[in-house]
Amino acid sequence: MIDGKKVLFSGMQATGNLTLGNYLGALKNWLTLSDEYECFYSVVDMHSITVRQDPAELRKRARNLLTLYIAAGLDPKKNCIYYQSHVSGHAELAWILNCFTYMGELNRMTQFKDKAAKHADNINAGLFTYPVLMAADILLYQADVVPVGIDQMQHLELTRNLAERFNNIYGNVFTIPEAYIGKVGAKIMSLQDPSKKMSKSDENPNGSIYLMDDPDTILRKCKRAVTDSEGCIRYCDEQPGLKNLIDIYSACTGKTPQETVQEFDGKGYGELKPAVAEAVIGVLKPLQEEYARLSKDKAYIDSVIKENAEKANYYATKTLRKVQRKVGFPDRIR
Ligand code: TYM
């Protein structure tokens, strides 16, 4: 609790171009929850270097992502928007939690297996312990709730297990966090292969709608989206491409999938696809405009970076000192 409010933590990697999946699965929910909770939204640049990065590019992407959080509507006066690498507590707590995490637990992480297969020439220890850093992110702020897409659920379960393990040994140190998964949009699939999630790292750019795509590109990608030969609008697992388009439309318009099916009853994919594009453009256009405006305001973004890093450091240090004391590190002499 901070000032009588429950705490929310979430983050995104500053790697690749953000997709509509990132927006609908996470960022959109951040916006709806931000009044109710004391919120920490991190640009998790330390996670990004588990895969080799170009330094100048990473720095640029990290700043762009931080700007995008604000452009999406998160007020940095109310929400703590900051770079993970500006708060050393993340790394310090991660080290301690590493000593409470079993190799077997990390071996089971599907994201590690996927990434290790993709980057076979660089299976580094950071990639393996990535979920421990993620647990540190969340536990450092005593978060009650963590809004994420479905793909992060396994990491969240590990976080809960680590928190419980630590609390069982040392007493009530950590708040046990709950995942918050949105009703629609928690797993947006590739437009080209609806068995795969829409991903920043997809080699086929037609599979993903990027947050900075222009209207023509969005329309083209939606029209080309892989569907099936059934031809009628239903919401079922047997028509995964169609289901995905219904999810996207519903998440963008605030309708339920059932309402969307009713709206398009008797119509074909030829009518649904442009309507999906229009709904997506309606969400992304204001975001892109605000992003373009904010990107030019260097002084403002710099002030957000400075002030919010101080705020994040304050709360992070509070938890860190408590944890350090519990595990037996000597007190600091003031
Ligand atoms: P990342 O950067 O891959 O994704 C950011 C958020 O977007 C969600 N997401 C999706 N949701 C729906 N459909 C999709 N196709 C889709 N693709 C991505 C993700 O679930 C995520 O919520 N490890 C995290 C970042 C992280 C984090 C944290 C998150 C680091 N520490 C602490 C929460 C709390 C990651 O790589 O997300």
Image (spheres, helix red, strand yellow):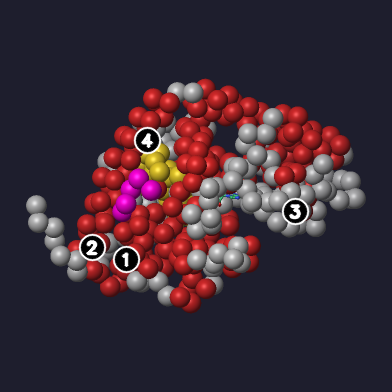
The spot of residue 106 in percent (x, y) is: 49, 71
Give the mark, 2 or 3, whose residue is nearer the N terminus.
3
Residue under pointer 3: 194
Q: Which residue does the image show at 54% across and 28% down from the upper left?
A: 291
Which numbered marker is on residue 96?
Answer: 1
Earlier along the polypeptide chain: callout 1 or callout 4? 1
Q: Nearer the viewer, mark 4 or mark 2?
A: 4
Q: How far from the left and from the top, in percent, is residue 30?
A: 49, 41
Q: CA distance from mark 1 to mark 4?
A: 27 Å
Q: CA distance from mark 3 to mark 4?
A: 38 Å
* Above or below 40: residue 156: below
Circles 1 and 2 in contact, beta carbons < 8 Å: yes
Whether the residue carrying mark 4 lies under 8 Å from ligand 1 is answered with no
For the residue marked with disc 3, what is the amino acid? Answer: Pro
Instruction: Single out the mark in the foreground, 3 or 4.
Output: 4
Give the residues drawn in magenta, as a range: 85-89
Earlier sequence position, callout 3 versus callout 1: 1
Q: CA distance from mark 1 to mark 2?
A: 8 Å
Lateral position of residue 321 relative to residue 221, left or right: left
Which comes sooner in the sequence, label 1 or label 2?
1
Q: Secondary structure at mark 2?
A: helix
Marks 1 and 3: in contact by CB < 8 Å? no
Taking depth in this image into account, of 109 and 260 the one nearest to the observer is 109
Q: Which residue is mark 2?
A: 324
The secondary structure that dominates the magenta segment is helix
Which residue in the protein does label 4 denote?
305
